[in-house]
Amino acid sequence: MPFIDNDATGTRWHTCHRELRWSDFDQYQHVNNAKYLEFGQDARMVFLKDVLMEMDIAVPPFFVRYTTIDYPRPLSPGEAEVAVSSFFTKVGRKSCTMRQQVRDSLGQVACTIDTVMVGIDMMTGKSREWT
């Protein structure tokens, strides 16, 4: 499993890698800002699949309620892949918050994504508590 326990912070990070493609770069030869959101979404799905598979439960229905993205440094065409590290910063009764860091080949943070996800009742379309 791609998990790393951080004893200092008490967090459990999950990391997955994504190869960069030619189409990820914009006309200025930087990764397009919208691509970071895709990197986070892909990594979030892999994270949930790995965590829930480990717990032997199905993926609960949820939707993304809110996302913030911070871009401290650009990714350049010299990068072949990115590493996306994910962990939960908060788990509430109906929602949870995940932090993701997109890192370059030197391990430097190129982007931090914070996402609030809300559990949803598929029959009513309304938020519901986690089970």
Image (spheres, rainbow, N blue to C red):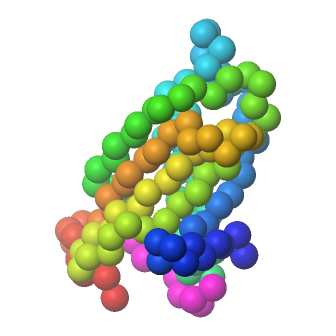
In this picture, residue 119 sits left or right of residue 84 = left
Number of on-image labels:
0
Q: In this view, does 34 lie above or below 127?
A: above
* Residue at left offset 32%, top offset 58%: 116
Question: Is the magenta region chiefly helix, strand or loop?
Answer: loop
Q: In which quarter of the image is the N terminus?
A: bottom right
Residue at the top extreme, as displayed: 27
* Residue at left offset 75%, top offset 31%: 79
Kindly indicate the quadrant of the structure image that contains residue 7: bottom right
Q: In this view, does 114 lie above or below 50?
A: above
* Magenta run includes residue 107: no
| Residue 46 location (% of width, % of height) | 62, 63
In this picture, residue 48 sits left or right of residue 88 = right
Front-most of residues 69 and 34: 69
Q: Is residue 123 at least partly visible in the picture?
A: no
Kindly indicate the quadrant of the structure image that contains residue 24: top right
Q: Is residue 8 at least partly visible in the picture?
A: yes
In this picture, residue 30 sits left or right of residue 119 = right
| Residue 55 location (% of width, % of height) | 57, 89
Q: Quadrant of the C terminus?
A: bottom left
Front-most of residues 124 and 96: 96
Provide the residue span drawn in magenta: 54-61
* Residue at left offset 73%, top offset 22%: 77
Kindly indicate the quadrant of the structure image that contains residue 109: top right
Front-most of residues 6 and 52: 6
In this picture, residue 18 sits left or right of residue 37 = right
* Residue at left offset 49%, top offset 66%: 87
| Residue 125 location (% of width, % of height) | 24, 66
